[in-house]
Amino acid sequence: MTPQSRELMPSLPPVTKAFLLACVAAFCLFELVPWLEPWFELWPLNSGYFLPWQLLSYAFLHGGFTHLLFNMLGLWMFGSELERVWGARRYTQMLIASALSAAAVQLLFTWAIGSMQPTVGASGALYGLLLSFGMLFPNRIIVPLIPPIPMKAKVYVAIFGGLELFLGITGGSGVAHFAHLGGMLGAWLLIRYWRSPGRRR
């Protein structure tokens, strides 16, 4: 690999790499032994299948290769730089907080509508990273895959947040839109806490 190619594709920092590899490993494992997967999906509280570890384990599972691919691309695009800025410890705290808040909001939503469908995917944590990126680098120009139009990070976050809220309210897509919003909420609350006056750093 030439120095130029290393600059264009920097190596993944350790926590981002570990999370990516864990998601890929989980996907391969449950393709081989699919009967194990329901134990780690996030089941609604009133389904009779909810278990405490599902609050985090669901984030390592994905509903298909495309779901996994897009989440891992988002992890690479936004997570890598955030980990370099924050360091491994704070970045890990953000991943956990976003995944937990996404799970909490999704559980509240499924309880409210009486759904019995489980939730899987790192999307809630990824939306937390997306909001974090927009808060740390609001004027950074990015070119997302969808749509492939250059825009400021804060605009991209606002568009996707608004779209998730709209799709969550209208429903019917089978996507856990409120989990995505929950991940963004958790990230916002954690960054606000980190920035709170008088807090010891």
Image: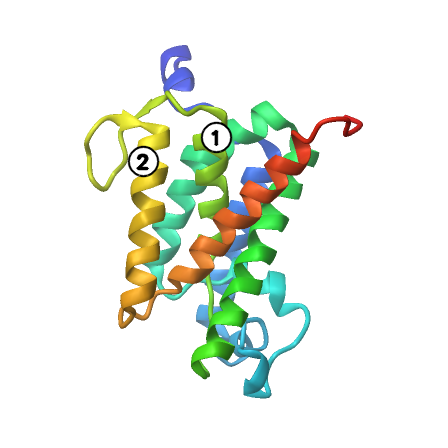
Q: Is 3 above or below relative to 49? A: above
Nearer to us in this view, 88 or 45 = 45
Q: Of the numbered discs in the image, which one, if any, rests on residue 135?
A: 1
**Dot 1 amino acid type:** Met
Would you say residue 24 is visible in this rendering? no
**Residue 129: % across, % down:** 49, 40
Identify the image quadrant of residue 153: top left
Q: Residue placed farthest to the top in the image?
A: 3
Q: Of the numbered discs in the image, which one, if any, rests on residue 179?
A: none
Residue marked by disc 2: 156
Would you say residue 68 is visible in this rendering? yes
Which residue sits at x=39%, y=66%?
Answer: 63
Q: Is 197 above or below relative to 165? A: above
Other-residue count near label 2 (Cα within 10 Å), few / some / many at <14 / 14–19 / ≥20: many
The colour scheme is: rainbow
Q: Is 105 above or below relative to 159? A: below
How many marks do you count on the picture?
Answer: 2
Callout 2: helix, strand or loop?
helix
